[in-house]
Image (cartoon, rainbow, N blue to C red):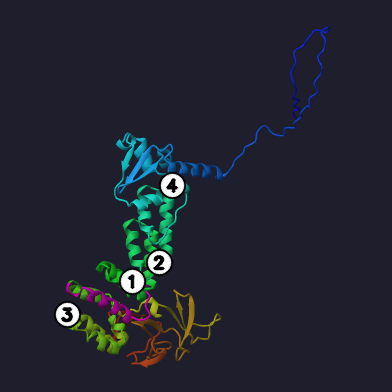
Amino acid sequence: MVLLALGRRTNSSTSDTKESPVVKRKVLSLLILSDDFDFCSGASHSEGILQVFNEFRDCRLFTDVVISVQGREFPCHRAVLCACSSYFKAMFCNDHRESREMLVEINGIEAKAMEAFLNYVYTGRAKITTENVQFLFETSNLFQITTLRDACAKFLENQLDPCNCVGIQRFADAHALKQLASRCKNYALANFSEVSNHEEFLDLRIEELKDYIGREDLFVSKEEIVFEAVMKWVYHNVDQRRPMLNSLLQHVRLPLLHPNYFVQTVEGDELIQNAPECYQLLHEARRYHVLGNEMMSPRTRPRRSTGYSEVIVVVGGCERVGGFNLPYNDCYDPVTGEWKSLSKLPEFTKSEYAVCALRNDILVSGGRINSRDVWLYNSQLNLWIKVASLVKGRWRHKMGVLDDSLMLDVHSTFFF
């Protein structure tokens, strides 16, 4: 603890000198608990200075450079520009011609973009709108103001709509905004039926369109939507896009179209009728409509959004203690994480039978002891059907599928 006494200092005098009248003064005593005190006025200090500099800019006071954009002049302070932008710091702090000139002309941007940019530099605030977001992004990207650039990207993300998501994705790809581009792609996939009704969709490049319609996660309630979108895109510029029809239909799952729609709309389309290269795809769809799951191709696999998905099927089983075989069959959907019960397996008292999947159905053969029975589970009907028996009864045997042929052990082959 330090005791500090404050008073007036007087010169000493001899004892015989007459003492002058004493002026009584109050003595100030301070109890000091620490040696120093750190004071900070917070963000208001820097905001106040910026506000003053902005007023200086408006009055052209202390400005030492003029930025010229599209013939419009903007008086500025080099120090402020350099403090906010590494672009201007590199321009004014190195031995460039602009570092010595009073008037600096910048090309490639708009005057209104420069005005909005300078308002942000001097105030830390920017009003982003649908009208200025694109050129404000490009200006902040040019001058390397990442905070303003990211704010513009976030604004675009919040404005996603079926009428603009394609255009915003192109903008994001052009400026290497991977996160924004990914959001646009996912939005377009999830809203494909609405997106395909807008003008931007018709201006897609063929590679972009193929990327959409070839995706498993394309969200459509039915495949007819994909076919109509492709035909709409082709007819928009039919002379140039006619040769692309076959390559596009390769990604349309024609076999999954409703048979009536396929006959009336697809086969009845004049452009398709005059495209011999598409006949093979039409023939594939006809075969599927006749044979069903017996005819498989990449185009017979339903998209996830249609409600169909690959599942894991558990056939039969036994009690924990053994001795009693179970008839239950269950399937597990890895996408939804849900279990679902299927039709019970007939003659479940058998055991040691063989099971395999053939196309979209399940086959069970043989069983204890030397059974010749073969059962087929029809996934569309959720029903077990007894089919042709084995030539020789089998149990504890192996069964598999090769080229749509059912293989038992190494001696027997059955065709379905």
Q: Amino acid at mark 3?
A: Ala
Q: Amino acid at mark 4?
A: Val
Q: Amino acid at mark 2?
A: Leu
Front residue of 238/332: it is 238
Q: Is residue 118 above or below residue 386?
A: above
Front residue of 364/54: it is 54
Front residue of 158/212: it is 158
Instruction: Name the N-terminal-most of marks 1 and 4.
Output: 4
Residue named by callout 2:
160
Which region is colored magenta? 214-239
Residue named by callout 1:
215
Q: CA distance from mark 3 to mark 4?
A: 60 Å
Q: Which mark is residue 121?
A: 4
Secondary structure at badge 3 equals loop
- Tell us which disc is closer to us: 2 or 4: 4
Residue named by callout 3:
275
- Provide residue 203's location: percent of width, then percent of height: 27, 68
Mark 2 vs 1: CB contact within 8 A: no
Mark 3 vs 4: CB contact within 8 A: no
Secondary structure at badge 4 equals helix
Going by the image, does 94 lie left or right of 331? left
Instruction: Name the N-terminal-most of marks 3 and 1.
Output: 1
- Provide residue 290's location: percent of width, then percent of height: 27, 89
Q: Which mark is residue 113?
A: none
| Image point (32%, 51%), residue name | 109
- Tell us which disc is closer to us: 3 or 2: 2
- Provide residue 115's location: percent of width, then percent of height: 39, 50
- Tell us which disc is closer to us: 3 or 4: 4
Q: Amino acid at mark 1?
A: Arg
Q: Is residue 10 above or below residue 111?
A: above
Instruction: Name the N-terminal-most of marks 3 and 2.
Output: 2
